[in-house]
Structure formats: structure tokens, C-alpha cells
Image (cartoon, rainbow, N blue to C red):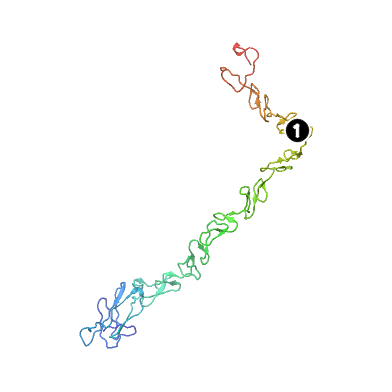
Amino acid sequence: MALLQKNFRCPCGKRRTDLPVTISRTVADQQGGILLARFVLRRSLAVATTALNPASSSFESKGPTAAAVSSSLANGYETWREESRQGGRLSVEFRVTCAEGFTSSTCTETCPGPNDVNARFNCTEGGAKICLEGWSGSECERAICRSGCSNEHGYCTRPGECRCRLGWQGVDCTQCSRLPGCLHGSCNTAFECNCEPGWTGLFCQRPICKKGCHPTRGFCDKPDICSCRFGWKGPNCEECKPLPGCVNGSCGAPLECICKPGWTGLFCHIRQSTCTVDCDSENGYCEKPDECRCRVGWTGPRCSQCVPYPGCVHGDCTDKPWECNCQPGWTGKLCDRPAPIATTDASVTTNFTTPELNGPTLSEGTNTD
């Protein structure tokens, strides 16, 4: 009968064989022994043990007194497995160990040497892995990160490290990273920019002005204020600023000075008297009841005559100042050049009137110079 047991010193010594050669040995009742088999590992191991009836040359009619057993190497090596079969009172314990210097579930991985600085585990005599401090996992493949390192947002490749994943920061990788460029905001998760009160925009870069601040005439560089643009004033920048120096006037648009009744002048600083003379109401005004003073560009007793363009020689203005409308026979900006005489057929029209010539006509051959 073949019997495998872990705590027995074999009186016959150790025996080895290459599977599938059968190992057999005869032992006395209730005697134990160890049989050592060396073989190439596959995915699983099968151990079959039978007990032969010593009074017969064949097996008992009930068959072997111990059933075949099997164990997947993935369930762990170096662990004693026990299978018992009553009737013949046969107990079998077995285990699988790697040859010296080898480890892994298939005993194909070399154990690290004593001076291997990259070692993650040590091997037992039978080839089982014992993880070094800072490593975990069935193959000692996982580094143990620094205490407190976020399991979700942190990781490590060496024991005691805490490296942050993209979008997270801090000693323990528990602080989110804001959206790049976020000025006045915060985040609850990676790459957010949640604006603080008083700020708006993609990067929380624009302040929210005071309520009621005019959208075009006012602005702000800090929350809850209202600064007026040039030419405007008031709490909400809705009032125009009159022309600087305007005394008795108002404005409908920035830098205007619209005089109140009874005042005149550029800055509405001149008190206007009621005219007793005939004075043009648009082009003139009275500082005294009997005095008609003309506004710029107008002249005459009633201020009803426009002033021509300065330097205008042979021209005048019609209904507005600073014109220079040339008299017949003159041309130029200042009407200071004689207009050319038409020499073509009389049907040709020119922009100027030919002045009347005294004396002989051109057809008589007289020189007009």
C-alpha cells in the first residue's frame, strides 16, 4: 500500500520517479511513509492511491479503499491537502513544491537573489512566494502606497509612493485640479471651474456688476460696483455729462450744452435779454433789449445774412455760412480764377457763364488778351 504523510521519516529513504510511472511500497498496518515524486508541472495534479488486500492477489470487490484526488495548482502549493477513505482506514496527505530556486504556480519563475534590489518577494524552501514589505498580491505584483493615498485618484509603482492621476493633486491626491485658466473659481471634481459669488464666464474671469448698472454705459472690474464710461455719470451710468464748463445748460448726449431758456453762449453762461428789435431768432440773440448780436457765421442788422467762406473773392453764400458760390465767369475754391471761355458749338453746356465781352467778337479776329 502506498501512503503519503507529512510527518513521517521514511525508513527506506526517499524515492523519486517521473510520472506516469507508478510508485508502490508495502507497509504494515497503520504505518506511514513518504514518497517523493519529481515531474514537470501542468495545470493540475492528480494523485491516485489504492490499497491492496494482502490476503488476495487482487483488489477487494469494493475496489480501492482510497479515492483518486486532484488539486489545481492555482489553489496554492506548499499546502498539505488531505483525502480520507473509510473502510480501509486509508489517509492520504499530499502537497506540491517547486525545485530550489524556482517559484510561481508553474514553478517556472526564478526566485530573486539576495542582492536583487528590485526583488518584490522571497522564496521558501519549497518555492512559495513571501512578499517583501511594501508589496502585496498573489504574485507580489502590487505596490502598497503611502498611508492615506486616495485609492481612486492616486497610485504607486514603488512602495510608499503616492502619485496622482490626471486632474488630481495634493499629498494624498484628494484635491481636484481646476480648469486651466480658472481665475475666480473652484472645483469639486477634475477640471471644473465653479465661479465664486460675483464672477461669471468660462474661466470665472468677468465680474458681475452692481444690479441695474447700464450694460453699455457702465462697467466694473470688481463685483457689485458700477463704473461709468467717458461721458456718463450717475449710480447706474444712465445720465450724460454735459460739456465741461456748461453753466446753465443740460445734455441729451455726452458733452452737449443745451441752454436753458434765457441763457445763451457756448457754455450757456450769457444771460439772454428779450429783443425789442427785429433779430433772427435762430442766428441772433440779444444781450440788451435793443441790441441784436449775431451767432458765428451770420451777419447783418437782423443776423439773417450768412458769412461767405474767408477769402472768397468773386462769390458769396446763399442759405448757410462758409459757402463760396462763384459769380458768373469765375471759378476755383475761392472764386478767384476766370472761368475758361467756351470755343465749341453753342450747344455745349459749361458750369460757368461766359462774361459779356465789349468790343469786337472773336470772329472778327480781335485779340481778347
Task: Give left or right: position of 123 versus 175.
Answer: left
Find residue 287 and report its image quarter: top right
The N terminus - image quarter: bottom left
The residue at the point 31 percent across, 73 percent down is 44
The residue under label 1 is: 293
Q: Depth check: 277 or 55 in front?
A: 277
Q: Secondary structure at mark 1?
A: strand
Task: Give left or right: position of 33 versus 132.
Answer: left
Find residue 311 and report its image quarter: top right
The C terminus - image quarter: top right
Task: Give left or right: position of 206 versus 105.
Answer: right
Q: Position of residue 358 (x, y in %)?
A: 65, 14
Residue 101 visible in the displayed image: no
Q: Is residue 113 above or below residue 66?
A: above
Find residue 319 and report its image quarter: top right
The residue at the point 34 percent across, 74 percent down is 73
Tell which residue pokes out farthest to the left in this image. 57
The residue at the point 30 percent across, 75 percent down is 45
Q: Position of residue 165 (x, y in %)?
A: 48, 63
Q: Position of residue 238 (x, y in %)?
A: 65, 48
Q: Position of residue 309 (x, y in %)?
A: 68, 29
Task: Give left or right: position of 243 versus 5.
Answer: right
Q: Amino acid at mark 1?
A: Arg
Q: Is residue 344 above or below residue 27?
A: above
Q: Depth check: 229 or 292 in front?
A: 292
